[in-house]
Image: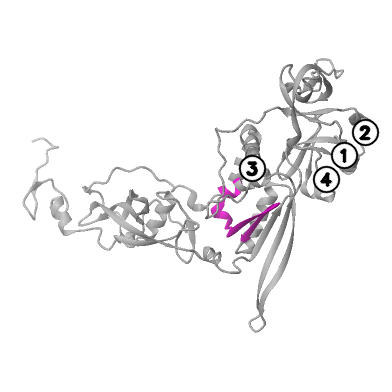
């Protein structure tokens, strides 16, 4: 007799030869007598707000989730009753038609049956989606729906800054809790049902653009008997009137604070601070929003005034230090308007790498500029300066590779009514300027993610569902074991 030889037994119910097991029954007979899915819901209801696309998780709390996402799976598992006595091995969605208002969740569960045998079965729960409006969305359809209004304003002749803010709002739409947005000639009005939500939004604006804010309040109604009152708060947020590539003339106080920078400078970058670069020397400096608003000033040249210039001669400046190269160059170029007249102009620039003979550069023409009209008394150096090189000439190419996502209202209208030139200018800054693109990505990551946005901890693929009987030592099963993914 071989030691590893086993002998079969007969099923105690139907008499079919089987391998020995603790129940002495075959799998069909065991399933006929024991059903581990008893007490588990086969149908449930899922409340969905069709305006903000969020699902109810109890106690009037709504969470944003996309179809067939881990967040939605966690919400569904939490609503299924009867899972506390079984072990959930796997869970997933069964495809349903998008407009059927039905969501099917497939569960692979295990439970101990007789004498230590563990039975594994598949169970399907169907959710009926009920469309409704959450409390914040209900407020938008009644009067006095908001408690705090944030008025964002910038007095400039373009919409690039608000398009940039639109991208930040679009990526964090579910977290900002904005009830309504209205557009005005020089900005946007954001409405919030909670004053704390408006305060977080103002903090986001301060981290994104240079600005200052002031608050006011208005009494709507008051009940002297119950000592309650309805107050509407308004926050005015003013954005600095400077944007990237603007040509400015620093006031004397800023000229001294920045160590003699400029005073003729180009705005190189705008975030929570305003960064400047001297186009003639390459020196850099920056101002905070509070410093700028102590004595605000505007630009007298912006990207609308850029013209193309062809570099004819570029000569590197000798800084007098042996073995050390200089980044300053004297350039002779010809503007597009002077090509037929054969007129050339000379200037000094810090963009040495861009000024190769034959290349096109973007320049600002300083001819016929009345500095006195801007309250500027220029030095003798700038009186003889005819052009200032800003950077590389990019022309009017269209960015067909990238498309700007837009924040639209229920009527399908974008909240920022911007011309195509401003959209192309923002795409140029976001995708051609790698530093600005990295800055936007860093800002998105620093805003924080919802807990539901994280994937389930320890989730790993499991085998496909199969009605099989397995035998293992008796183990206590307590709680819903689906890798601890339980949305709050």
Question: What residue sits right under mark 1 in the picture?
Answer: 255
Callout 4 environment at 10 Å: few (<14), some (14 to 19), or many (20+)? some
Q: Nearer the viewer, mark 3 or mark 1?
A: 3
Judge depth for marks 3 and 4 and give the one in front. Answer: 3
Part of the protein shown in magenta:
167-191
Check disc 2: other Cα within 10 Å, few if <14, some if 14-19, many if 20+. Answer: few
Label 1 neighbourhood size at 10 Å, few (<14), some (14-19), many (20+)?
Answer: some
Circles 4 and 1 in contact, beta carbons < 8 Å: no
Q: Earlier in the sequence, mark 2 or mark 4?
A: 4
In this orientation, does residue 280 appear?
Answer: no
Q: Is residue 103 visible?
A: yes
Residue 379 is marked as: 2
State the residue position of label 4.
297
C-alpha gap between disc 3 and disc 4: 26 Å
Mark sitting on residue 419? 3
Front residue (pair 200, 2): 200
Q: Quadrant of residue 270?
A: top right
Q: Quadrant of residue 430?
A: top right
Q: What separation in Å lies between label 2 and label 4 (alpha carbons)? A: 18 Å
């Amino acid at each position: 007799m071989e030691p590893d030889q086993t002998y079969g037994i007969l099923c105690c119910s139907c008499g079919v030869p089987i391998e020995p097991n603790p129940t002495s029954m075959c799998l069909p007979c065991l399933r006929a007598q024991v059903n581990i899915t008893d007490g588990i819901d086969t149908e449930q209801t899922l409340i969905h707000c069709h305006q903000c696309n969020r699902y109810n998780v109890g106690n009037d709390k709504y969470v944003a989730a996309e179809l067939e996402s881990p967040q939605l799976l966690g919400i569904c598992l939490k609503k299924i009753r009867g899972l506390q006595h079984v072990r959930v091995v796997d869970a997933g969605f069964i495809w349903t038609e998008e407009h059927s208002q039905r969501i099917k969740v497939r569960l692979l569960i295990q439970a101990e049956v007789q004498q230590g045998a563990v039975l594994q079965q598949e169970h399907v729960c169907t959710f009926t989606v009920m469309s409704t409006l959450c409390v914040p969305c209900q407020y938008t359809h009644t009067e006095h729906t908001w408690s705090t209004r944030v008025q964002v304003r910038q007095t400039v002749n373009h919409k690039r800054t608000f398009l940039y803010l639109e991208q930040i709002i679009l990526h964090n739409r579910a977290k900002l809790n904005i009830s309504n947005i209205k557009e005005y000639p020089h900005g946007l009005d954001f409405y919030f049902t909670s004053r704390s939500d408006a305060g977080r939004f103002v903090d986001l604006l301060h981290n994104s653009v240079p600005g200052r804010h002031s608050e006011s309040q208005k009494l709507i109604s008051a009940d002297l008997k119950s000592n309650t009152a309805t107050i509407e708060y308004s926050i005015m947020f003013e954005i600095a009137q400077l944007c990237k590539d603007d040509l400015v003339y620093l006031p004397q106080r800023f000229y001294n604070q920045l160590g003699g920078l400029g005073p003729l400078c180009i705005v190189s970058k705008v975030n929570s601070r305003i960064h400047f670069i001297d186009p003639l020397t390459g020196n850099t400096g920056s101002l905070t929003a509070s410093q700028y608003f102590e004595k605000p000033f505007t630009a007298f040249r912006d990207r609308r005034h850029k013209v193309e210039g062809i570099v004819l001669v570029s000569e590197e400046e000798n800084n007098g230090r042996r073995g050390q190269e200089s980044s300053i160059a004297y350039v002779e170029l010809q503007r597009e308007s002077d090509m037929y007249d054969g007129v050339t102009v000379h200037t000094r620039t810090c963009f040495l790498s861009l000024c190769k003979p034959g290349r096109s550069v973007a320049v600002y023409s300083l001819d016929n500029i009345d500095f006195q009209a801007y309250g500027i008394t220029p030095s003798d150096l700038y009186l003889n300066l005819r052009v200032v090189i800003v950077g590389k000439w990019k022309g009017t190419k269209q960015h067909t590779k990238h498309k700007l996502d837009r924040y639209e209202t229920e009527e399908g209208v974008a909240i920022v009514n911007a011309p195509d030139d401003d959209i192309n200018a923002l795409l140029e800054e976001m995708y051609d300027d790698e530093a600005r693109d990295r800055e936007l990505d860093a800002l998105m990551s620093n805003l924080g993610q919802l807990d539901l946005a994280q994937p389930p901890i320890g989730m790993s693929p499991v085998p496909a569902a199969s009605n099989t009987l397995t035998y293992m030592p008796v183990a206590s099963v307590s709680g819903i074991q689906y890798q601890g993914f339980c949305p709050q």
